[in-house]
Image (cartoon, rainbow, N blue to C red):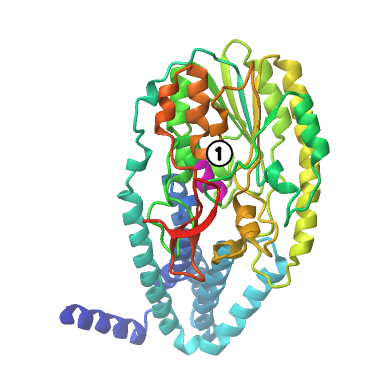
Amino acid sequence: MIKLLTKLRNKVINFVNSSKEGVVISAIAAGLYPFLFYYNSNFNQVNSWSQFLFFIVVFVLLPIFVFLVVYKSLKYFFKENKNLKFVLPLLNFCCFGILMLVSTYGLRSRKLIAFVLFLSLVLTFLVVKHFKKIVILQLLMSFLALSILVTTLYKFIFYSDEWLQQPDNIEQVVFKEKPNIYMIQVDGYANFSELNLPPYNFDNSHFEAYLKEKEFKLYSGYRSNYFSTLSSNASLFTMSHHYYSNPNIAFGELFKAREIIVGNNPVLSILNKNNYKTHLILERPYFLVNRPKMAYDISNVVSSELPYLDRGFKTKRDVKSALFSMISKSKDSANFYFVQKLSPSHVTNSSSNSVDKDNQRVLYLDRLKETNIWLKEVIEKIEYKDKNALIVISADHGGFVGFQTTLHSTIKQTDDALIRSIFTSTLAIKWVNNAPDFDSKFKSPVNFFRILFSHLSNDHKYLDNLKADKSFIKIDQGAPFGVYEYINEKGEVVFEKNK
């Protein structure tokens, strides 16, 4: 080990003292750390092979090409010009700065781009004599970032999917009834039973009356099992608890959540075996940014259409027109439609201390009113086109109203109303005939499809393996980092670390 370190030290010293320009190594140093930083920060969004190749080209190969062409060209035309010593440092700093900007804020701000270029010019003149030491520092940063990525890759490759396994033969369930199922997921829509209570304090009775008039049954007290869209939907479509799968304090998302949600999960497998045609209709392609293998038959978004630097929120699709078009084209089969409407959403994700939580509540409620109008239009159209539709209106989590920002939800809370605000989720169902006599079991998403499939198959044995209707969250402040149970099966607020 000592010999290896000594050899490495000698190579570093030789590089710093060498008269060679080091064009290629300067280019690699400029792009490698931003590349690894982006992967470490967004791994679950960029873990496809096509994205990996794209980032290698943009962050590594393209800088090498640009550095070689620019430097060699200038050297050819100007030969012994003394100012050539500034070329590589300027290229390196500009490239490093722009790629770091791409990895964090994107290239939307001209002012930030101008600032990066100006700072690169200043640094070039200040540290030109020590440029090779800067290159070594960049490579050292890259090595440290690579060690983090290797750890993440190891967890990703050896990720255990045992939690996906069902405790019975529900994946062989046979439906006796096959209505078209419309599952409309309105992001962050709090349950009707909570909206009129603090911290929401909102009278939604007009819309509730509309739903009842349309023969929807409203399920009070329904709440999510997890606090984010990905973690909640992963549990919904697997009918199982994942408990965030041994989370890391530096890694926010559940591994392979997108692959589970749109891929060959137990719910889609059951629907396919019962000859359902499955439709995925997204307002924004958040579920598809890492190009997961699609198990849905039809989608209004194709992964190949997405920009490689897209994090899922740049483009907005017309959900209503996509849904109505699919309904018109799918009259000869039983159909399942999963419709995601990213409204009313939740309070901001911003980390700024200037955010006003009271203003966030007002904005949320304004969006909720707009969502009510949108839902009415969709319901009316579905009823017009499909007289025997089973329509589900549900949410993935609460609106986080009462919090200054969603980021504060990972700080241990003692206010019951705030904790419920995280998880409270609407659920309203228009049954084809009558609601099943066991529909009081609808408490949380983890059991939603198991209960629904028991009803459609007229087989109650699948109710024997319902999961615990508990709500979990990751806490990283106010208590030792870990996954904690926040609401128990009785609906009581607790704080118990998950084992």
Q: Which residue is mark 1?
A: 443
Q: Is residue 1 magenta?
A: no
Residue 310 point in image, percent of width and height: 59, 50
Whether residue 291 can be seen here: no
286 in relation to 482, above or below: above
Query: Which SS type dominates the magenta stretch?
Result: helix
Left or right of residue 407, residue 466 in this image: left
Quarter occupied by the N terminus:
bottom left
269 in relation to 433, above or below: below
Residue 492 point in image, percent of width and height: 55, 52
Tell which of 444 and 365 is nearer to you: 444
Residue 250 point in image, percent of width and height: 45, 65
Magenta-highlighted residues: 228-234
Q: Is residue 229 magenta?
A: yes
Q: Residue lying farthest top?
A: 332
Residue sitting at x 47%, y 41%: 235
Count the labels in the image: 1
Residue 381 point in image, percent of width and height: 76, 23
Quarter-wise, where is residue 148 in the image? bottom left
Whether residue 346 can be seen here: yes
Identify the amino acid type marked 1.
Lys
Residue sitting at x 63%, y 74%: 117
Numbered disc 1: secondary structure: loop
